[in-house]
Image (spheres, rainbow, N blue to C red):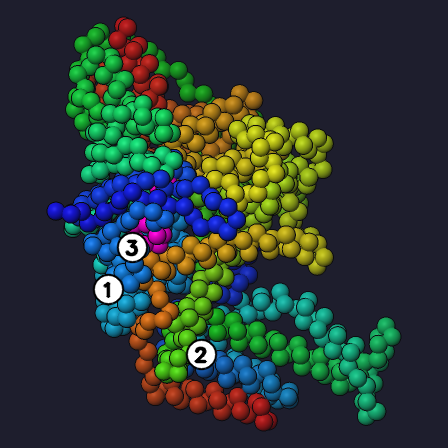
């Protein structure tokens, strides 16, 4: 029985699985850029064949990285109600033009072949994106993301681009998200222990919203307090955005990285143009 | 020779927009020599943390000055050097961790001084080895135990090779073993020449210090060596402080006319001075048959309960590993175990918030392994005060926070209930009901949290580490509250790793270890079973330790009836009257 209070389990962040795989061995910068390229391709590909190619490459990535598909599947299931609403909206709000083939009339809504196809594309697109993002979370640790960002942005330092601020923001966000999930969990438990209605009984978005909304203000306050302490702690450990900082990690771009990155760019381009 | 840290007439008043807030520090004069170990004690709100934050320049004096190694903290250009010299471990170390993995966090302070990556990696590895976290290097901090988090924070500070380290209540969240390890680390750092200043609520932890500073209302009221400070028991008591437990026991022995040095600060010293027993050894009374808990219908019955957090994810963590436990009605039941042994998880099973993955669990007539058992029904009978409950507030005003539960259950006379609950914990209804929660002191917040559970008047009450972070006076008040609840025939289950406190109140005691209950029985029996305690990384209460030493000196003491200081004294008096 999975607890209804495990908010932490519902966040994709921190799901990194250290594995000895080809993908994990790539330079974090290459990995970050590969995911970015594939993401762009899948989001913007206009055709079904492009999505098929996207699905194929994501599948290939999962096999290469030796990561499980279950978390992706779980995320998809959680998002499904919202995606279905989007898909229905797509059908309801779609304009009908003369050349459209009408499939039928459901509860007064005319469903055209094109609208149905678009709704299907939307579902498929999100399906692949969710798997891609889960793959990203399982193969790139948050520290790899920040160090990749640090080195990718380093050349901009000369242009007075605030890279220290930016990487610190990313780093602390990554640190805070699980902390906020834990805080939410604690407050929810405290309410439940005093008679708050936290029992999951079927799918009822209004009740769910009624439960979650009162958590937002205390969570904000808690996070702000934490942020205040953390700012002091950072200062006492010598953090100063205005000075030059170094990085714990040294990254090395190899030929393999170049090959994978080029492949990803090529596939992404194919998806967009196919 | 001038001292490394020189504080002269330090006053501090926080900057506020509207009116003049009261001064937090009111004229502190203090000098700390290089290489010394200084302990700061004082009630919550006496200004300890504020003083500490002046030493590394996070706060700047409103009046007076603080000079560290010739650097005046008021001058901004001194900041970077000051931060390099002085490192600080904050009260809640989790708030100090910046990065998402242990190794990377230790590196953070080194990245800030722009060290080359190779040097950072070398120092991080050294620190990981030194604190024993090499295997956790890649773990995310939010999944570490309290003791581990603190080690990360310390490693992050030590990697920068400071000359002074400041600790703010470093041991409040640690279990006995972790606390011992920590104190040893501190002593080792001092040996290596580090200057250390630390805040604590536990007097036992100050006896190795070179200097103790006792604070009250923003002033230093006492300062000196442990011997000098702990001979002033009355003055400490006035300031809401106390002498170490061993000193109190020794004083009572002294009053018996025994030749005991004054003051005694260490158990070893007292044990060496214990007299040999010369009276007649009374015939050993046949021991009463220990009462069998299972004879009456039990209140709580757990069989083979398993629970895993984040089940099915890569971060899954097993917390309960086959718990068997029975408890009887209207008793005070202690639940002892090291951090991570599963106490909190077990408590959350008893009030139905978590449900077993496997096994059967019954509380009163509720079958908790049955998903149809409604949580709302269970919590009406079983109340739970979480660990650090003040982090879980969600309302704005005190009154609303306490009234939340009664409102959920649509109870009658909510106002009267709230008033009653507030009076029970010692908060005036009219003075506090409209106060904003964030304006309360730490101690007051804890009371609000207690009241917000007590207001529901459940028959079974669970407490998770209730004394963590409390000063001595607050601990005494809480013990009195427990006794009041006990008189009302409530069933109390108190989880704690401080056996001294459990011993004062519990009838029955269970020991937990790696997700299992390894021993349950009458408090006197369990608390004196040395093997079970040490296997569970717990240390026996002081009284038990002394009782054993007395028995070694031929004293005919029944150790199972002498596990608190009070009981020990009456056992001794019984012997003397023989």
Labels 2 and 3 touching (C-beta < 8 A): no
Q: Which residue is mark 1?
A: B123
Q: Quadrant of residue A217?
A: bottom right
Q: Position of residue B19 (x, y in %)?
A: 50, 46
Q: Give whichever of B449, A58 is nearer the camera.
A: B449
Q: Is disc 2 in the same subunit as disc 3?
A: no
Q: Which residue is mark 3?
A: B73
What's the residue at 47%, 43% (across, down)? B21
From what the image shows, is residue B226 above or below residue B190?
above
User: Which labelled disc corresponds to residue A233?
Assistant: none
Q: Is residue B527 visible?
A: no
What's the residue at 60%, 36% (across, down)? B433
Q: Is residue A79 left or right of residue B161?
A: right
Q: Which residue is mark 2?
A: A32
Distance CA(mark 3)–CA(mark 1)? 28 Å
Q: Which chain does tag 1 point to?
A: B
What's the residue at 23%, 9% (across, down)? B281
Q: Which residues are magenta?
A: B47-60
Q: Which chain does tag 2 point to?
A: A
Foreground mark, 2 or 1, reads 1
Q: Position of residue B319 (x, y in %)?
A: 45, 48
Q: Secondary structure at mark 3?
A: loop
Q: Quadrant of residue B173?
A: top left
What's the residue at 30%, 10% (across, down)? B574
Q: Is residue B92 visible?
A: yes
């Amino acid at each position: 029985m999975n607890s209804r209070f495990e908010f932490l389990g519902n966040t994709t962040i921190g799901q990194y699985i250290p594995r000895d795989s080809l993908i994990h061995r790539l330079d974090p910068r290459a990995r970050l850029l590969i995911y970015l390229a594939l993401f762009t391709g899948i989001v913007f590909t206009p055709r079904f064949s492009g999505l098929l190619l996207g699905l194929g490459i994501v599948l290939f990535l999962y096999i290469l990285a030796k990561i499980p598909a279950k978390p992706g599947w779980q995320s998809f299931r959680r998002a499904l109600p919202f995606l279905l609403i989007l898909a229905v909206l797509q059908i309801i709000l779609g304009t009908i033009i003369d050349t459209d083939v009408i499939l039928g009339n459901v509860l007064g809504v005319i469903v055209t072949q094109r609208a149905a196809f678009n709704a299907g594309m939307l579902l498929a697109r999100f399906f692949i994106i969710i798997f891609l993002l889960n793959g990203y979370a399982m193969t790139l640790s948050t520290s790899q993301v920040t160090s990749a960002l640090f080195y990718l942005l380093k050349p901009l330092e000369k242009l007075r681009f605030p890279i220290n601020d930016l990487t610190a923001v990313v780093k602390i966000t990554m640190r805070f998200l699980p902390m906020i999930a834990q805080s939410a969990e604690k407050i929810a438990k405290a309410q439940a222990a005093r008679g708050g209605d936290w029992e999951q009984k079927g799918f009822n978005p209004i009740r769910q919203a009624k439960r979650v909304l009162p958590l937002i203000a205390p969570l904000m306050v808690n996070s702000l307090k934490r942020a205040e302490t953390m700012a002091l702690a950072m200062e006492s450990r010598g953090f100063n955005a205005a000075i030059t900082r170094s990085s714990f990690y040294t990254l090395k771009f190899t030929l393999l990285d170049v090959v994978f990155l080029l492949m990803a760019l090529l596939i992404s381009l194919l998806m967009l143009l196919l | 020779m001038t001292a490394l840290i020189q504080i002269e007439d330090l006053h501090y008043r926080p900057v506020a927009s509207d009116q003049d807030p009261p001064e937090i520090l009111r004229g502190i004069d203090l000098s700390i020599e290089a290489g010394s170990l200084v302990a700061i004690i004082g009630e919550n709100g006496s200004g300890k943390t504020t003083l500490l934050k002046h030493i590394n320049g996070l706060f700047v004096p409103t009046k007076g000055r603080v000079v560290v190694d010739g650097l005046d903290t008021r001058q901004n250009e001194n900041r970077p050097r000051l931060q390099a010299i002085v490192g600080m471990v904050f009260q809640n170390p989790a708030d100090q961790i910046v990065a998402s993995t242990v190794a990377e966090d230790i590196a953070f302070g080194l990245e800030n001084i722009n060290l080359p990556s190779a040097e950072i990696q070398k120092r991080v590895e050294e620190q990981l080895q030194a604190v024993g976290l090499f295997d956790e290097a890649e773990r995310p901090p939010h999944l570490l135990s309290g003791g581990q988090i603190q080690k990360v924070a310390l490693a992050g500070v030590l990697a920068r090779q400071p000359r002074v380290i400041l600790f703010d209540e470093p041991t409040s969240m640690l279990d006995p073993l972790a606390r011992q390890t920590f104190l040893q680390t501190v002593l080792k750092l001092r040996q290596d020449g580090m200057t250390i200043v630390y805040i604590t609520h536990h007097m036992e932890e100050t006896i190795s210090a070179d200097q103790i500073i006792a604070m009250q209302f923003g002033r230093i009221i006492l300062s000196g060596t442990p011997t000098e400070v702990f001979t002033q028991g009355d003055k400490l008591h006035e300031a809401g402080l106390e002498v170490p437990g061993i000193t109190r026991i020794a004083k009572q022995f002294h009053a018996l006319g025994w030749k005991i040095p004054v003051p005694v600060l260490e158990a070893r010293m007292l044990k060496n001075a214990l007299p040999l027993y010369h009276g007649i050894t009374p015939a050993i009374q046949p021991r009463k048959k220990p009462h069998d808990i299972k004879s009456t219908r039990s209140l709580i019955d757990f069989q083979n309960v398993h629970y895993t957090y984040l089940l099915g994810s890569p971060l899954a963590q097993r917390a309960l590993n086959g718990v068997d436990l029975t408890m009887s009605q209207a008793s005070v039941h202690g639940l002892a175990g090291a951090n991570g042994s599963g106490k909190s998880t077990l408590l959350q099973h008893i009030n139905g918030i978590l449900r077993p993955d496997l096994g059967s669990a019954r509380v009163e007539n509720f079958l908790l392994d049955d998903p149809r058992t409604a949580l709302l029904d269970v919590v009406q009978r079983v109340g739970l005060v979480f660990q650090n409950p003040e982090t879980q507030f969600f309302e704005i005003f005190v009154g609303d926070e306490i009234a939340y539960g009664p409102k959920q259950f649509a109870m009658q006379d909510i106002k009267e209930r709230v008033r009653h609950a507030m009076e029970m914990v010692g908060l005036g209804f009219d003075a506090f009901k409209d106060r904003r929660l964030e304006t309360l002191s730490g101690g007051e917040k804890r009371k609000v949290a207690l009241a917000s559970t007590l207001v529901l008047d459940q028959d079974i009450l669970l407490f998770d580490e209730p004394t963590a972070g409390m000063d001595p006076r607050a601990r005494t008040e809480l013990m009195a509250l427990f006794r009041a609840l006990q008189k009302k025939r409530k069933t109390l289950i108190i989880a704690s790793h401080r056996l001294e406190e459990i011993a004062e109140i519990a009838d029955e005691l269970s020991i937990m270890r790696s997700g299992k209950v390894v021993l349950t029985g009458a408090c006197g029996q369990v608390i004196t079973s040395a093997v079970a305690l040490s296997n569970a990384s717990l240390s026996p209460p002081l009284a038990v330790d002394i009782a054993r030493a007395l028995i070694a000196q031929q004293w005919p003491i029944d150790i199972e009836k002498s596990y608190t200081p009070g009981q020990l004294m009456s056992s001794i008096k019984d012997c003397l009257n023989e």
